[in-house]
Image (spheres, grey):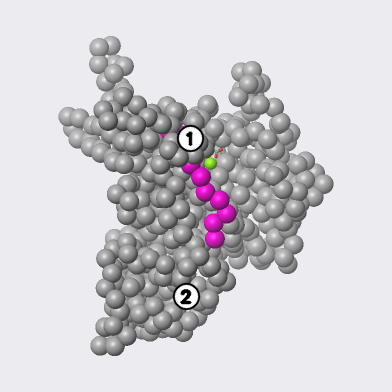
Amino acid sequence: MNPSAAAAPRLLPGLLRFPHGGPDIDFTPAIQTADDMLAFAKKHACTILDLTFVDVPGTLQHTSKPLHELEDVADGGAGFDGSSIRGFKQINESDMLLIPDPVTAMLDPFQAEPTLSVLCDVKDPLSGDFFDSSPRTIARRAVKHLQDSGIADTAYFGPEAEFFIFDSVRYEQGQRGAFYDVDSSEGIWNTGKEGGLGYKIRNKEGYFPSAPFDTQQDIRSEMVREMERAGIKIETFHHEVATAGQAEIDMERDALVTMADKLMRYKYIVRNVARRFGKTATFMPKPLFGDNGSGMHVHQSLWKEGKPLFAGKEYAGLSELALHYIAGLLKHAPALCALCNPTTNSYKRLVPGFEAPVNLIYSARNRSAAIRIPTYSQNPKAKRVEFRMPDATCNPYLAFSALLLAGLDGINRKLSPGAHTDQNLYEMDDTSLAKIPHAPADLSAALDALETDHAFLTESGVFSEDFLAAYIAGKRAEVSEERMRPTPSEYFKYFDA
Ligand code: GLU
Ligand code: MG
């Protein structure tokens, strides 16, 4: 037995705190190679290796080994049965390999045993190639395509994921009934609850009164501390607009694949810190009727040789290249929705009136435009475009890759984004508003758009036709299943019709 492992303290879940030390965190990535990873695991007396990877819908999966297997895994990968993983099904060739990427190694703060967690690529053991349908493979190909194009060498992404932290959630659906029921001590519906203390957050007034309205600062702070200990640098965090515990934590931008990795860890940390506090967190885009949903605005910029390419003398301080990029995003927005807003629930957020970006137009001011150009800073390095449509139920490897390819298509074809608007779209008359194209009304319409408009994803070989066909078929099955279910609100409206 490894003596240092035997001497390691046994900790209860949630008590493996401050593994990277106190407040001063060095964000320089320290682990680059398999040897660094081994040294890091030894230094922290890890006993368990947790191999994590992401399936096609975007759920983090994991499988574990005792740490003594790390050297073998670093050399030859770890075998697993790909046929049981959503989106990976290839029944004839189900044997696949997980190849840990050392730069993603971190300590998992939610396990009692000191655990080294690492994100993996997926390889085909026979050909030795990266597995075509693994989202991380697709994201790697997108970055390679950008670099080969000569347009830029780095695409930075900065997602602003929103989520709710609820006290409890119940749901059930069967043949004779269906319901959901969420609760939060902050919920405006709890003003009349016996023993209440008031200070409930009214609908759309959660941005951002201080305590005792806001009861979740400690939870968000702990999420932020765990993220930073995991090497994810945070810029800002706050209570979000909706009642009942809506929150937002914003990461410093990073390159495409790294940011998709970070977002997977972000969601893992949000969910598990909430659980530590006896709460539950959800990234579901529209969990509450009658208040804001949760989006994930995605800030993007292209850089070459350390220079920002989006700053210039055009509208809102943008470059011509940035305007073409915007045009690409707008042109392909309906198809992008199928990857960036991939659930039937996503479209319950994309309705007017709840700060949701339904209008396919760009603006330096208006938050109901699909694209906003933030103007807080005049620094060219901060110049970026914010695509406001996505939500955090998307698979970030697929969504970021598709966004980049849409922007590059705009650049390659020198597309024009048309006129911007600085008008308040909430106050625009219906006839003018009707002239602005809208987000697809539902997932089915978004899938139709992706079916007809996907050459921008496949021409470069980043997404394959087969992958997209399987993706669309899987999502269509979700839509059909959902369509067959009567809902409580249909009972309310039609039972006596
Ligand atoms: N929650 C809103 C959305 O669905 C955004 C609110 C904000 O501007 O941050 O996109
Ligand atoms: Mg927000």
Residue 161 location in percent, x, y?
49, 47
Farthest-out residue, right: 313
Q: Residue at 34% x, 26% y: name it.
A: 191
- Is 241 a magenta residue? yes
The residue carrying mark 2 is 102
Is residue 303 something one can see in this rendering? yes
Q: Range of the magenta residues?
A: 233-243
The residue carrying mark 1 is 206
How crowded is the residue under tag 2: few (<14 C-alpha within 10 Å), some, or many (20+)?
many
| Amino acid under disc 1 | Gly
Report the front residue among 258 and 77: 258
| Amino acid under disc 2 | Pro
Q: Check whether the beta carbons of the residues at disc 2 and disc 1 lie within 8 A of each other.
A: no
How crowded is the residue under tag 1: few (<14 C-alpha within 10 Å), some, or many (20+)?
many
Label 2 lies in ligand 2 vicinity (Cβ under 8 Å):
no
Label 2 secondary element: helix
Looking at the image, is 438 positioned above or below residue 107? above
Left or right, 117 with reference to 181: right
Looking at the image, is 242 positioned above or below residue 313? above
Q: Residue at 57% x, 41% y: name it.
A: 388
* Gap between marks 2 and 1 measured at Cα: 40 Å
Q: Quadrant of the N terminus?
A: bottom left
Q: Residue at 29% x, 41% y: name it.
A: 168
Is residue 319 something one can see in this rendering? no
